[in-house]
Image: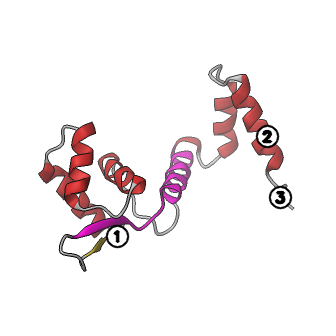
Amino acid sequence: MEKNIPSISESEWEIMNVLWDKAPQTANDIILSLQESTDWKPKTIRTLLDRLVQKDVVGVNKNLRVYTFSPLYTREKYQRAETESFIKRIYGGALKSMLVQFIQEDTLSEDDINELRSTLNKKPKKQ
């Protein structure tokens, strides 16, 4: 993972997604949001939120009557870190091997292939 980014569990990702969509939020806001999509009890959600605060992934504003919580890292930073970790674990750090495998799968549409080509063409060449 990218340096200095604490790892988070799948359940903690759920909390982070709620905060990345809208922050700051109170614990009750987060609980209400997650109870729509999960069967988690409020106590479970509070425990996960506390863990994220302890890991310094979520910050707490204690200046208001009700504490509010905000992410300390962007979703993009976490996605990049998770991607790097995945490539390292599964493909020995070889991004090319992963890309070749995905490209060889039949699941890519013509639009997907054209978008990949366009992205590769825009990428500056290494000196």
- Out of 118 and 6, give the one closest to the viewer: 118
Task: Tell me the amino acid under the disc marked 2.
Answer: Ser
Residue bearing mark 2? 118
Q: Determine the image quadrant of residue 34.
A: top left
> Quick check: marks 3 and 1 in contact, CB under 8 Å?
no
Residue bearing mark 3? 126
- SS of the residue at dot 1? loop
Vertical placement of residue 52 versus 97, above or below: below
Question: Residue 75 in magenta?
Answer: yes
Count neighbours of disc 1 (C-alpha within 10 A) and say few if under 14, some if 14 to 19, many if 20 or more. Answer: some
- Out of 61 and 54, give the one closest to the viewer: 61
Rendered-image quadrant of the C terminus: bottom right
Q: Residue at x 14, y 50 (%)?
A: 42
Q: Which residues are magenta?
A: 67-89
Vertical placement of residue 4 versus 97, above or below: below
Task: Tell me the amino acid under the disc marked 3.
Answer: Lys
